[in-house]
Amino acid sequence: MTADSAKPYRHPRRGIVGPFLIAGIILAAWTGWWFYLVQQIEARLEAQVATLEQGGWTIEHADVTTTGWPFRARVEIPHARILAPSGHGVAAPAIVAEANAWNPDRWVIIAPDGLTLTRADKGKVGVRGDALRMSVSHLRDRFPDLRVELVRANFTPHPGADPFPIASAEHIQLETRPHLTNGEATTDEMDVLFNLVDARGRRGGPVEGATQDGRLTLALEGTVQQASRLKGPNAAGIFANWTRSGGRFTAVRGELTAGESRARLASEALSADADGRLTGEIALTAEKPGPVMSGMASAQSGAVNRAGAVGAAAATAVNGDRPVDLTLSFRDGRTWLGPFALAPAPKLF
């Protein structure tokens, strides 16, 4: 054996260093992208706030922090207060928004410590729950996909505020997305889905009366025409502009359960009048509608016309437990069941 053959074999170091060098380059490039993304997010947030403030909005918050490296962008806005010119607004101890760094086109926004809704001249109501979140995606599309979700939420009016219709709900969901025809998004239409599951009315209110101390569940879906006209500086401006442009809700379908009563709902077109009150008709196929009317008649609420509710209860009681076809009309600012005025028509703005 020669001296050279006795030397131990040494592996080339390039084979070991290479993978670490490549990983380091990728990490450096990704870190650069992440910081660039964060700067873009913060700049756009500041620009959006400035635009809203120029339009009369009030926006207040403590210092914004952005974290989440390497795979997420997490923006935390503490002590946030947002108030529209209409007087409607929201405040929260903290608002947190998150997106994947590789897909900043989809954001999830949560209020981990609850929030407070301001209802213009009706006062404030506190909202707490297991989850209060909103997600928005396809931000580059004409109508982004929007989803608002409240899980096991409780509603508590502040002292001096007007009552809130419900005290709690197991689940509240609102979704909007572009309307599709043959798989293609239509020009100016948007689908809307609303679910309210196991809601309990406030003590002495119309929901509690209608459900006979039970629970209210409502599922509605429909299409918004002239959706691009839903623009304006505040809620009144948004819906007023939409109404003047011929905006309507079409193909409205739904189901309602109130205590022992059930109904299927359908309307081909609903709109709003100049005062923002809903106009149009809804066809109902109702099972046991009498308890709902009787409950509304006994409700301790100035919004319910007790005489109309009593008359409607007597008229619907004729059918007993058999299903009955009814027409709910919204006209002249009131909600009518046949000749009986029940309550003010729902107000959009």
Image (spheres, helix red, strand yellow):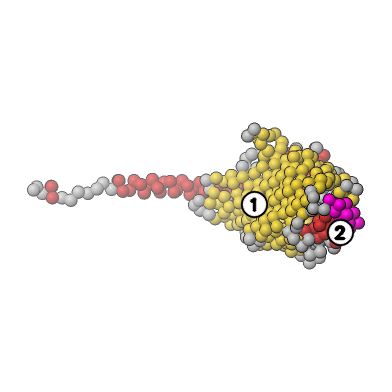
* Residue at x 66% of width, y 42% of height: 177
Left or right of residue 93: residue 345: right
Q: Is residue 272 visible?
A: no
| Residue 303 against residue 22 in the figure, above or below | below
Q: Which of 146 and 304 is in front in this view?
A: 304
Q: Residue at x 67, y 34 (%)?
A: 181
What secondary structure is found at the residue carrying circle 1?
A: strand
Q: Does the magenta stretch include residue 307?
A: yes
Looking at the picture, which amino acid does disc 2 mark?
Ala
Across and down, in percent, residue 305 comes to: 89, 56
| Magenta run includes residue 164 | no
Query: Residue placed farthest to the bottom in the image?
Result: 159
Disc 1 crowd, CA 10 A, few/some/many (<14, 14-19, 20+)? some
- Tell which of 303 and 49 is nearer to you: 303
Q: Dot 2: few (<14), some (14–19), or many (≥20) neighbours within 10 Å?
A: many
Looking at the rendered structure, the kind of residue marked 1 is Met
Secondary structure mostly seen in magenta is helix
The stretch in magenta equals: 302-319
Apparent side of residue 27 relative to residue 181 in the rendered image (left or right): left
- Along the line of sight, which residue is nearer the eye, 53 or 136? 136
Q: Quadrant location of residue 295?
A: bottom right
Q: Residue at x 77, y 58 (%)?
A: 211
Identify the mark at residue 297; answer none if there is no mark: 2
Q: Nearer the viewer, residue 101 or 144?
A: 144
Distance from disc 1 to disc 2, alpha carbons, whole Å, reads 37 Å
Point out residue 343 in the picture as x, y percentages from the top left corner. 86, 53
The residue that disc 1 covers is: 134
